[in-house]
Image: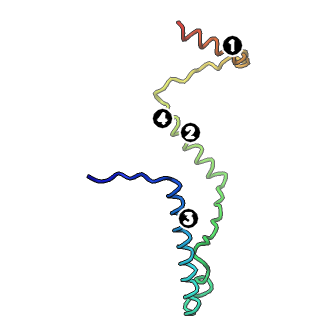
Amino acid sequence: MPIKTTFDPGILSAALEGLELQRKRIELQIVEIRRALGAGSKASAVSPVAEPTRRRRKLSAAGRKRIAEAQKKRWAAFHKGTEVPTETPKLAQKAAPAQSRNKKKAAGARK
């Protein structure tokens, strides 16, 4: 019968920090050895930990329009079978205080 073990998140985070520290130390040793051998160019001598930053891609207005139209088409297809209310609520109902709306909801629930 296997023993079920649970690990404390504190222990796991400490273990992760220790392993990351070991990895950084090993990567630095690899860089030093490559420099000593003279086998690497300037690009390979840089620590592999530093990742290059990605530039954001710009989307044209036409591309945004195509995406919006496609999303509207998907939305319409998804909601095709559901009933859409044709009347918009009156402004007076929207402006009613929240307290009275809550009372109406409670009264409706009691019925």
In the picture, the disc for residue 78 is 4
Name the mark on residue 100.
Answer: 1
- Name which residue type carries label 3: Glu
Mark 4: give few (<14), some (14-19) or many (20+) Cα within 10 Å.
few
Q: CA distance from mark 1 to mark 3?
A: 55 Å
**Depth check, front residue: 29 or 42:** 29
What secondary structure is found at the residue carrying circle 2? Answer: helix
Circle 4: residue type: Phe
Q: Position of residue 85 (x, y in %)?
A: 57, 21
Q: Secondary structure at mark 4?
A: helix
Q: Are marks 1 and 3 in contact (CB under 8 Å)?
A: no
Q: Which residue is mark 2?
A: 72
Q: Is residue 85 above or below residue 40?
A: above
The residues tagged by marks 1 and 4 sit, at their Cα atoms, a distance apart of 35 Å
Give the mark nearer the N terminus: 1 vs 4. Answer: 4
Q: Could you tell me which secondary element the residue under label 3 belongs to?
A: helix
Amino acid on which the number 2 mark rests in the picture: Lys
Relative to 32, residue 110 above or below: above
Total numbered labels: 4
Residue matched to label 3: 17
Distance (Cα) linking label 4 and label 2: 10 Å
User: Which SS class for mark 1?
Assistant: helix
Residue in front for this viewpoint, 28 or 64: 28
